Image (cartoon, rainbow, N blue to C red):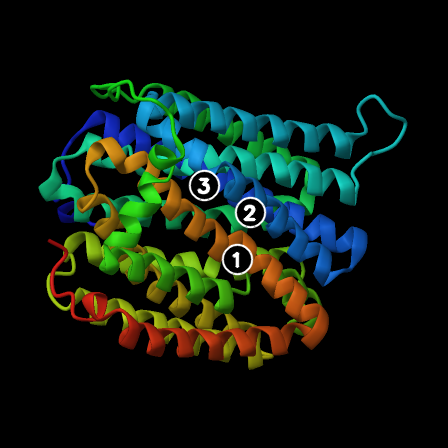
Amino acid sequence: MPNDTFKQLPPLPSYLRLWFARLSGTMGSQMLMVAVGWQMYELTASAWDLGLVGLYQFLPALLLTLVAGHLADRLHRGRIVAVCFALQALCAAVLVAANLGWGSPAPWISRELLLGLSVLLGAARAFQMPAQQALTPVLVPPAMLPRAMAFGSGGNQAAVVAGPALGGLIFVAGATAVYSACAALFVLATVLIGLVRYDHDPAPSEKVTVRTMLAGAEFVWRNKAMLGAVSLDLFAVLLGGATALLPMFAKDILHVGPWGLGLLRSAPALGAVMVAVVLTRWPLRRRVGHTMLAAVALYGVCMLVFGVSTHFLLSLVALVVSGGADMVSVVVRQTLVQLETPNEMRGRVSAINSVFIGASNQLGEFESGATAALMGPVGSVVAGGVGTLLVAALWFKWFPSLSRRDRMV
């Protein structure tokens, strides 16, 4: 990233520790998902089971959302994130033990174990995401938030680039090597996030009621531009995502091995990083609503191209462009959410935002697996691309406050 880009950001040690912790944790998470997906497909050869991995991660996030948001507004957010990273390190260690066969004469890796750990990973991320999202606004001044969001998303996507590619390469040495590297990265993230310092001002003591738990959802519902932004991202990625099916495309359609799967998983993040660098240096200033809707439509077109492609290079290019388009949507959504939410509610609002993200990613993986079981992987991705284009058109009409949004603030 160019030096002048770094000069646009405040030299805040705690923000940089958070940035590197996210980088390490996201890289570990992406490597973990590459290995889990490949092992699951090797064990079962089932698109349905690939989808279940995503569903089993999403359900805990859905069930724990209100509790996670409430805690993020009451407790030290950095400590919550540190505990979540530590739990993910434990899951990776269990997978190491299962593949080595510790305590047993043979490896005890199984479909049931992978699904069970997916539940634990989903629970950890349910608490991690709202606390992590709500940390950045208390570490940087408001004027720097759009750039900090773009810079943070760029680092996150850089990890998504490096993680799957590195995971695919390490997988040559076996799944155990991948899971060991993941455990080390999660431990590093735990240490770094434990060093984040900010003035934690506990929320005033108030009785916990259904109304206080639902305050974040009520706030998002009242803010139609925010509601449009988060729901647009939800339905676009829910319908158009192809992540869960990448093992099938890599093995059965494009005829590449784990290394190819790693590159396919990295491709969207590569495009996202390139766009994030641009947005960090030159943040969106005008017509942000139109830009977001156009980016989602471009994402849908990319999914159509990827779905019909039988050439590895064309598939990579389609995924790279899709990642760049998605990054525009991510930056607009995250900036709107954080700028328009008071600090005492950021945990609960971020929890609602996390559910939308989880639904678009993990639930989207289940949707892809389920439709692929009925229509095949190509039919699933093509139908999703068409659905994404339809969503972009409908949201332009249904959410005029978003489509007419000119500036972030």
Cα distance, mark 3 to mark 2?
17 Å
For marks 2 and 1, give the CA distance.
19 Å
Residue shown at 79% from the left, 41% from the top? 110
From this viewpoint, is residue 6 visible? no
Left or right: residue 153 versus residue 255 is left
Disc 1: which residue:
265
Work out whether 45 lies above or below 18.
Answer: below
Q: Reply above or below: 283 against 287.
A: above
Identify which amino acid the numbered label 2 is placed on. Phe
**In the figure, is residue 134 to the left or right of 269?**
left
User: Can residue 311 be seen in this snapshot?
Assistant: yes
Label drawn at residue 68: none
Three-letter amino acid code at disc 1? Arg
Q: Amino acid at mark 3?
A: Thr
Please identify the quarter of the rendering in which residue 346 is found: top left
- How far from the left and from the top, in percent, is residue 11? 15, 31
> Which of the 4 quarters of the picture holds residue 276?
bottom left
Q: Earlier in the sequence, mark 3 or mark 2?
A: 3
Residue 362 spot, x, y in % from top left: 54, 52
Q: Quadrant of residue 9?
A: top left
Please give the residue where the numbered disc 3 appears in the rendered image.
26
Tell me the number on the disc at residue 58.
2
Mark 1 or mark 3: whose residue is earlier in sequence: 3
Q: CA distance from mark 1 to mark 3?
A: 13 Å
Eyeballing the image, is 273 above or below 214? below
Q: Position of residue 325 (x, y in %)?
A: 34, 66
- Indicate the position of residue 118 as horizontal and vertical percent values: 63, 41
Query: SS class of the residue under badge 2?
Result: helix
Q: Is residue 394 left or right of residue 252?
A: left
